[in-house]
Every structure is written in C-alpha cells, then in structure tokens.
C-alpha cells in the first residue's frame, strides 16, 4: 500500500460519525469523501489489505475519507431500538457537516464518491443546500438510483417482499433492521431510514417524507458540480442502468458523464477516447457490488475515474 489508514470521528453532539482516513504517503490531489449506500458502511470502499476504490485513490495521491453513516460501521452509537436515524437527518445535517468539515480542514474543493443510495441522499443534500456545490470539485455515482422501475422476479423478491414488507416488520420487532445478523446486507439499518427509503423507491415524487421539501424542483436550479454516473451491465435490480438514467433525468443531470460497465457494453458520453479505454480494460461483467470490489476495476474505470478527478481539480 502507498497509504496509511486511521480512524477519525466527527462529533454531532448526540452521535458521532466515523471516518476511515486513507492518507497517501505523498499527498498530491484534493480530498475525497466517500458515501456508502443502504445496509452498508464505508467498508464498501476500502479494506485493511489495501483493496477497493478508496485505497486505489489514496495510492494515486488523494486524501480519502470513507464515512460511516449514523448507526452504521464504527459510528457511535450503533443502530438499535434506542438509536434511530432518519434520511432527513442525513440529508440536512450529516452530509453538510461532512462536506464542511473536510473543506474547512483542507481549504479546497473536495471530490465526492457515492455508492447506490449514498448518491441519492447526497444529491438531495446538494439540491437542498446549493451553496455546498461551491465546495465540491466533482461527484461520482456508482449504481445510484432512487426509484426502482424495472420489473422482474428478482425485484419482486428483493424489493417488494424483503425490503418493503419484511423489512418494516423486522423493524417493529427489533427496533431497527438487523440486516447483518440475517445476512441481508453488510450492516444494520435504523428503522426510520428504512421507512424513508421505501417511500422513495416506489414514488414518482422526489419530495422529503419529513417536511415535503421538493428535491426535483430544487434540482432545476442547483449549480451541480462535474458529475459522472456509473452503471453495471449485470446490476439487474439495485442499480439498473435504466433507473440510474432515470435518476439522472429527475435531478437535471441527464447531460452528465455516463458509463455502462460490463463485458460487452461501454460508453462515456462525450468522450470516445475514454470510452475505448474503458472497453479495452473493463472486461468483467460487473454488478452492483463488484463494480467497486473486483480487482480488474483498477485497470479500467478506477484508473479513468482517478484521471478525471485530477482534471476537475485544476
């Protein structure tokens, strides 16, 4: 590894957010904040052995911070019957605090990298607080969708039955979603956060379940940073390419860079040379998780992303 790992915490009075800090041996580029999705934590981006996109970017000279959302990972306290946390809190308090924290520390624009639902709450936060965009150099979204419009047996089982029906029942029984214990995901989920996501997954309205703030309307006036969306050819439900592009459209980001990762299909809107480079290197049929974890990604889209991020820092 060409970086060192340590932990730091952002104190928000009644809870603390854990940040895994990946510090390169020689800092050359702007800091990176990485935001995970539902039933995950920051470990989707790194490992102690130096694997993952976060470690790759750190080895490229970026100072990387992988956040654990409230109640997840090493954040304190853990999700439980005694500690709940809503999507509204994450959008309005936690994400702005994380961005402000790193901007104040480095005094330069930061890069944001998101996986799945982490990109949804980030986009909502930037749309709601557009002044934050002046502190952001770029945003990269991996498998990010809000609505799940595709219909399939896998979607019926994973989303309609497990997430939308069994999930709330488990929350009523335990006071939170014990996803890790039941092997439904890499981490547990606070009850209110789960209920908030259910409202968005099936609704055309991109409005806040707590106070009805209209994120779709706010997105029309948001000065979005440079953005790149990644979808995977074998991501059939949780980040289907159709739903990723649907999210791009409702956030007014349809003209952002878009890449479909997979064995046969590669595209980078507006840049044929980079599309060819991705096609030559990304030979794995990526899915919702492997797009961030497969070793081949280091020779393909990880490398292209790092170069693009460097360009956005200029």
Image (tube, helix red, strand yellow):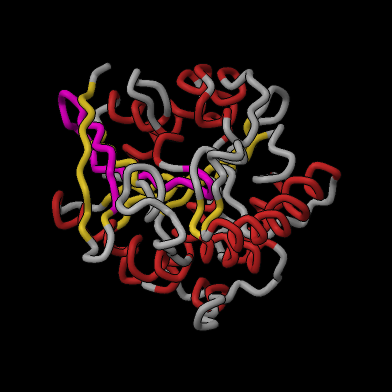
Residue that appears at 24% across and 42% down? 30
Q: Residue 234: where, in percent of width, then height?
A: 71, 32
Q: Residue 185 is drawn in which quadrant?
A: top right
Q: Residue 158: where, in percent of width, then height?
A: 73, 46
Q: Is residue 21 above or below residue 251?
A: above
Q: Is residue 68 above or below residue 5?
A: below
**Residue 270 visible in the shown view:** no
The secondary structure making up most of the magenta span is strand
The C terminus, quarter of image: top left
With 176 as the anchor, is 17 left or right in this view? left
Farthest residue to the front: give it.
Answer: 173
**Residue 85 visible in the shown view:** yes
Q: Is residue 135 above or below residue 67?
A: below
Q: Is residue 129 above or below residue 285?
A: below
With 226 as the anchor, is 241 left or right in this view? right
Magenta residue check for 201: no
Residue that appears at 52% across and 30% down? 274
Segment colored magenta: 17-40
The N terminus, quarter of image: top left
Residue that appears at 66% across and 53% down? 245
Most foreground residue, 223 or 164: 164
Residue that appears at 49% across and 53% down? 119
């Amino acid at each position: 590894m060409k970086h060192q790992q340590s932990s730091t915490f952002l104190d928000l009075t009644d809870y603390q957010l854990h940040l895994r800090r990946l510090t390169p041996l020689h800092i050359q580029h702007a800091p990176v904040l990485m935001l995970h999705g539902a039933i995950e934590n920051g470990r989707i981006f790194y490992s102690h052995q130096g694997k993952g996109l976060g470690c790759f970017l750190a080895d490229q000279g970026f100072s990387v911070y992988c956040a654990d959302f409230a109640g997840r990972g090493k954040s304190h306290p853990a999700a439980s019957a005694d500690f709940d946390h809503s999507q509204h809190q994450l959008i309005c308090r936690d994400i702005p605090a994380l961005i402000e924290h790193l901007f104040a520390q480095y005094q330069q624009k930061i890069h944001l990298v998101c996986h799945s639902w982490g990109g949804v709450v980030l986009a909502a936060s930037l749309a709601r607080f557009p002044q934050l965009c002046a502190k952001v150099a770029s945003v990269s979204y991996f498998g990010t969708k809000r609505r799940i419009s595709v219909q399939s047996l896998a979607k019926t089982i994973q989303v309609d039955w497990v997430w939308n029906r069994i999930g709330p029942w488990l929350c009523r029984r335990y006071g939170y979603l014990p996803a890790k214990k039941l092997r439904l995901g890499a981490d547990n989920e606070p009850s209110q956060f789960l209920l908030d996501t259910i409202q968005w997954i099936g609704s055309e309205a991109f409005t806040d379940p707590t106070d009805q703030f209209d994120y779709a309307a706010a997105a029309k006036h948001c000065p979005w940073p440079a953005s790149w969306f990644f979808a995977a050819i074998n991501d059939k439900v949780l980040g289907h390419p159709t739903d990723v592009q649907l999210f791009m459209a409702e956030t007014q980001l349809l003209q952002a860079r878009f890449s479909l990762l997979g064995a046969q299909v590669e595209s980078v809107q507006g840049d044929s040379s980079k599309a060819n480079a991705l096609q030559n290197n990304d030979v794995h049929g990526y899915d919702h998780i492997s797009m961030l974890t497969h070793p081949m990604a280091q020779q393909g889209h990880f490398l292209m992303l790092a170069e693009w991020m460097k360009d956005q820092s200029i």
